[in-house]
Each structure stands twice: as C-alpha cells, then as structure tokens.
Amino acid sequence: MRPLRRGTNLSRVAGFNESVVIDAIRRAGDGLSRVEISEQTGLSAQTVSNIVRRMLESGLLREGNRVTQGLGKPRTPLTLHPDGRYAIGVHLDPLVATAVLVNLRGEVATHLKLPSPANAQPAEMLDAIASAIPQLLTQAGIAPDLVAGIGLAAPGPINITTGTILDPPHLPLWRDVSVVEGLAERSGLPVVLDKDVVAAAVGERWTGATLGQANSLFLYLSTGIGVGAAVDDTIIRGASGNAGDIGHLVVDPRGPECECGLRGCLGVTLSPSALVQRAVAARLLSGAHLDAVRSGDPARIDESLAALCALVDGGDAGACELIEASARQLAKAVTTLANMMDTDVVAIGGPTWMRLRNVYLPLLDGLVRPGLVRGNAGKPLTIVGTALGDDVIAIGAACLVLDHEFAPAVTAIALAH
Ligand SMILES: [Zn+2]
C-alpha cells in the first residue's frame, strides 16, 4: 500500500478532489446534482463529470431519478452508495466494549458486545476483536473486500504515532499495548487508533448530531470524562493525539478531593462512582452500594448508578435534587468549554448521559446560557444529546476509517497493515 503520511498506510481510494465531492454529497444528505456539486466545490463541470463517472463505476455513488423542479432544468441527484464501502469500529471502554460494522453513510449494519477490557488481558481482547470481525460480516451479509479497515477508539493516554495504548487510568491491565500492530496482524486489515472522544467527535460529524457543523464539541460522560473538538472543520487531536482531557476542570470548589490536590474536579464530581457516593451519603442508596464503589469495577458501579437513576425516574425528591445539582456542575463544564472553544454545538453522550439525559438536557440550556461570553455574536449555542446512542464511540471509531479514506483533510493518525 502507498504511504500517505508519517505512520500511515491505509490506502486512500479518493484523491483530494474526489474527497471534496464525497464531502459535499455527504453533507447535502438528500443528494446533489453534478451542477450543484460544481457550484459548491468550485470544481469545473468537466472535472466533476469525470470524478462522478469513476465513483459510479466503483460503486461509491449512486444516481437517483431525474427530478423536474418548476421551470428549471431537471436534476439528477447523486448520493453516497451506502453499500459502497464498510468500516469496522471498536470501542474499548472500562464499562463497555463494542464492535460495529457501519456503511459508507455511517449507518450501523450490525454490532456485537465484546468482553470488558477492564478485566481482559490485552492479547485476549485483541483475539476477541479479531474473531468478532467475521461474525459481524456474516451477520450483515457483507463481503470482506468491502471493508476499508478497523477503527479503534480507546481512553487516553495513547500514542497515535506508534498505535499504542499507554496507561489509561481505568484500564490497569493495559500498559504500552501495541494495539494497531496487534490487531492488524490478527485481522489482516488496516487499523487506525484514536482517542475515544476524538472518535466520537468524528462520528457525530460524519453521521450524527454535529453533521455539517464546522465548530462543535462532543462531551463524553463515562467512568472517565473527556471532550472531542472540531474547530473550523478540523478535528483537534493536539500534539500527541491526547487532546480533550478535562478530568481536572474544577466544577465544584467545595466538592470531593481529587488526587491532583484540588477539590471538585469534573472527573471526581460527575463520575458514576461520585454520584453513587453522594447518593449513599444522602441516604438515598444503602451503604451496600459503597462496596461497588470500593471495588472499582465499572460494571458494579454502573448497577449502583442505575439504582440511583431508578429513584430519579420514580420521582424521588432527594434523588432528583442530587442529579439536578450535578446538572449545574455539568453546566459549568459545558460553559467553560463552549467559551474556550467558541463553539456552535455541544453534543453530549456516554453511559452516564444515556442514563440521565432526560434530567440533564432540559436543564442545561438555561444553566449554560447566562455564562456564555459571546452574547449575540455568532449563532446561539446548541446543546444536544448524541444522535448515535450507546454505540457513539464505536460508530465514531468506524468513521475514523471513512474519514481517513474519504474526508478532504488528511490527518496524521497511526495505521498499520
Ligand atoms: Zn483533579
């Protein structure tokens, strides 16, 4: 395969102009005619015609029926052929590990739950991922040669140049694991690694809540808390690929002590275990739930969080008050991030969000708006839930592959074959 960027050799089917055409069609949603592509991209009619012909032949595009609109010339919309290409996405999270197969539009063809990486040795985990691939393809009835590669999303810190997971705090068994090489060897497919929140931000932009937005954030609420950012249509990875660690953003100066020496850092205030601990202290949950917190087992802590959420859903006043207080802490983080990045959209997801979104979402707008510094400049900030649900990071991981292959801006991400 042809090397494209330092550390990468995932083949790009599309050249720059092809990527620009695909990008314009993808963003349009219901398709663009050749004339519209030419107008939107600035490419000449002849260039567009040639590119479209090649892409129709290779199955990446498909042509709709001619539509006559009023007195204008009939237009023939071109859309991405969803079955033109597939990608596999794998999310390694201490709580959830998932593999998905998505089509060119980022739609999930099928998905599989994987064993938790918190309890699995890395080699076993990579074996499990590799053996999930034929299962995914069989379930969806997809030929292996349509798969462009595997995207892997993991909590940081990671080294995206070497494709290594370094030492994520909530994955104690994972120290300096060469996941890109290990999975490429096992699967025979190109593999790309990125941080979980970066993958999610790519996924929401490719097919989800921030499609077509040049400036957006994705906030992930899980055992760890992080943010993925796109600024001026560019995903922010930072110098080492680990941008977005906001665990030590102080959201409650009188909150719990953090290992960093401060109090009320986001990571120790809004984590599932912190919410459970507060619920036990407020006698909303029994002391037995502290055992789950002490165990450090993300699955047990999640069960305790589910018990708290059941109280909220049942209208328990104390539980609702506790979660509403945590909404104010979340709002502080959102306000700071929105101001820092001057963003237009904040999308929020992750297991904690999925459990509490019905409480959080209606409150956030009113809590965040007074603290925004840009006032009437630009668009009003929009705060939305993930459009990709529980699988947002796995879908985002698959979209890393599509983004690398088809997005106009090539970014330095680690790949091996
Ligand atoms: Zn801290």
Image (tube, rainbow, N blue to C red):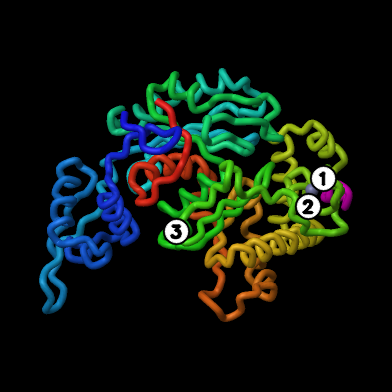
Q: Residues within 10 Å of mark 3 (few under 14, many from 20)?
A: some
Label 2 and label 1: CA atoms lie apart by 9 Å
Kindly tell me whether mark 2's CB lies below 8 Å from ligand 1: yes
Of the numbered discs 1 and 3, the one sitting upstream in the chain is 3
Kindly tell me whether mark 1's CB lies below 8 Å from ligand 1: yes
Where is residue 276 shown, x and y percent of the image? 79, 46
Where is residue 258 shown, x and y percent of the image? 83, 46
Q: Under tag 1, what secondary structure?
A: loop
Labels 2, 1: front one: 1
**Numbered badge on residue 233:** 3
Label 1 and label 3: CA atoms lie apart by 33 Å
Q: Look at label 3 and name its amino acid.
A: Asp
Q: Look at label 1 and name its amino acid.
A: Cys
- Can residue 191 be found in the magenta stretch? no
Task: Tell me if I can see residue 337 in this picture.
Answer: yes
Pick whichever, 182 or 410, lies toward us: 410
Q: Quadrant of the C terminus?
A: top left
Q: Look at label 2 and name its amino acid.
A: Cys
Q: Which residue is mark 1?
A: 260
Q: Is residue 391 left or right of residue 358?
A: left
Magenta segment's dominant SS is helix
Q: Which residue is mark 2?
A: 265
> Do the residues under discs 2 and 1 have CB atoms within 8 angstroms?
yes
Of the numbered discs 2 and 1, the one sitting upstream in the chain is 1
Q: Under tag 2, what secondary structure?
A: loop
Pick whichever, 294 or 161, lies toward us: 161
Task: Tell me if I can see residue 316 in this picture.
Answer: no
- Region in magenta: 277-284
Quarter of the image where one finds residue 348: bottom right
**Numbered badge on residue 388:** none
